[in-house]
């Protein structure tokens, strides 16, 4: 049996930030405008071809997502609702933190893991073990069905627990699973394997979505145009400036173990460049940037075809460049180890020289570097660009 899991699009609960941020759980909220865009971007996608059933959590945000995916009749099931956060649901996080009654959930190490634990739960809520027990009968019923392929639209914690129960994952593996909004995860239940499918908007030459989408693997196999967000962390050094570069993981499908842009990533179907830049910066480096912290500096086109890991990789992307100038201590960053080996500050002149000599140290796109140099020069920095530097 093949199962395609889809987490709902961005909800109003997901979108509230800072002082307005709330605990969502089973608080029944709708999708944001961005959430509807994310869901509509998946409509007609071949990943759903052949599905005999669309099984959906009975909450507003999952039903709304599923209705964007298909006109078929939906099967709603309360057993795949999101994990309950009990007394915290729908309440502002700051309000809960300030309430003496809940002091231990934010100060006592025995209780602070209530959102990421198989043993600790919010008051009146569920932990991951509770959710696993709740979804187990659902999976038993699904196994008894005659479906060859089904789509399940559910929630972050629940999809993690469903994958744990189906594939025999450990607790640690379960808590490390990424489940982005509207990013289909395909599971071959019989073989015990799963694959997360990333979908990108196909764009025109100016980076404007055409209304069609493509999987990551197909985009890179065929060189289909799509969008990325590139973030450069900079700091002034004398009359010039330095850039913080990340060393790419040795497992990356292109340019492994080379120094690259501070943070960069693909813009998922239905997403916009600025929120994508914020997400990538936080996921890869642990830097939480507000929208006003990132300055848009320009776009450029990346196009090349090269073999990596024994297969041809064809890139064709429009990169949206942002600059981050707030203070950053490299040693205090929280790195996404599967993506980033380390980070290091470099004088920008050293990076320019390394890119010119192609010595295998740097793989930063020169067009992006030029955009950042112009940005900093417009703000008073002086960059040595002659060969005198070598």
Image: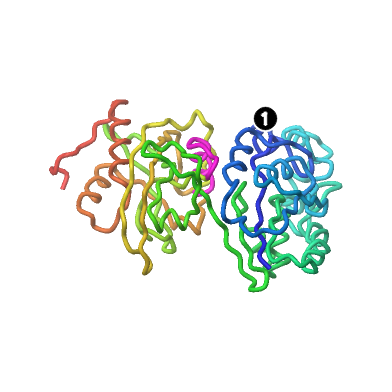
Residue 18, picture quadrant: top right
Residue visible at 19% across and 39% down?
385
Crowding around mark 1 (Cα neighbors within 10 Å: few <14, some 14 to 19, many 20+) is: few
**Residue 154 falls within the magenta-colored stretch:** no
Q: Residue furthest right?
A: 124
Q: Is residue 239 above or below residue 353?
A: above
Residue 102 is left or right of residue 322, and the answer is right
- Judged from the image, the secondary structure of the residue bearing numbered disc 1 is helix
Residue 282 visible in rendering: yes
- Residue in front for this viewpoint, 237 or 267: 267
- Say whether residue 14 is left or right of residue 350: right
> Residue 266 location, x and y as percent?
47, 47
Where's the N terminus, which quadrant?
bottom right
Identity of the residue drawn at 41% across and 56% down: 220
What residue is shown with label 1?
Answer: 19
The answer to whether any part of residue 228 appears in the image is no
Taking depth in this image into account, of 143 and 298 the one nearest to the observer is 143
**Residue at 76% over, 59% down:** 118
What's the magenta region?
Answer: 269-284
Horizontal side, residue 162 vs residue 325: left or right: right
The secondary structure that dominates the magenta segment is helix
């Amino acid at each position: 049996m093949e199962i395609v899991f889809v987490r709902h699009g961005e909800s109003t609960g997901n979108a509230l930030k800072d002082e307005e941020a709330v605990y969502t759980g089973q608080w029944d909220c709708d999708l944001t405008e961005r959430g509807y865009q994310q869901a509509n971007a998946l409509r007609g996608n071949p990943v759903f071809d052949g599905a005999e059933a669309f099984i959906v959590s009975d909450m507003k945000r999952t039903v709304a997502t599923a209705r964007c995916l298909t006109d078929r009749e939906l099967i709603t099931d309360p057993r795949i609702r999101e994990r309950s956060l009990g007394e915290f649901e729908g309440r502002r996080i700051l309000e809960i933190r300030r309430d003496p009654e809940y002091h231990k959930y934010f100060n006592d190490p025995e209780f602070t893991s209530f959102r990421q634990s198989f043993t600790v739960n919010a008051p009146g809520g569920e932990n991951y073990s509770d959710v696993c027990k709740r979804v187990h009968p659902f999976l038993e019923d699904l196994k008894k069905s005659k479906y060859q392929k089904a789509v399940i639209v559910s929630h972050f914690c629940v999809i993690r627990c469903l994958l744990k129960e189906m594939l025999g994952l450990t607790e640690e593996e379960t808590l490390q699973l990424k489940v982005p909004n509207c990013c289909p995860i395909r599971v071959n239940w019989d073989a015990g394997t799963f694959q997360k499918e990333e979908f990108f908007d196909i764009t025109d030459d100016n980076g404007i979505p055409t209304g069609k989408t493509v999987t990551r693997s197909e985009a890179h196999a065929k060189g289909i145009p799509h969008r990325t967000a590139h973030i450069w962390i900079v700091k002034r050094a004398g009359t010039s400036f330095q850039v913080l570069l990340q060393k790419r993981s040795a497992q990356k499908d292109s340019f492994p173990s080379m120094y690259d842009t501070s943070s960069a990533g693909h813009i998922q179907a239905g997403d916009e460049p600025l929120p994508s830049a914020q997400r990538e910066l936080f996921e890869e480096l642990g830097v939480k940037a507000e929208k006003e912290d990132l300055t848009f500096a320009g776009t450029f086109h990346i196009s090349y075809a090269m073999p990596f890991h024994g297969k041809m990789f064809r890139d064709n992307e429009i990169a949206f460049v942002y600059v981050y100038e707030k203070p950053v201590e490299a040693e205090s960053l929280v790195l996404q180890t599967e993506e980033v080996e380390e980070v290091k500050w470099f004088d920008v002149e050293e990076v320019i020289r390394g890119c010119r000599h192609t010595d295998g140290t740097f793989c930063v796109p020169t067009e992006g570097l030029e955009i950042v140099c112009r940005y900093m020069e417009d703000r008073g920095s002086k960059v040595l660009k002659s060969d005198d530097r070598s």
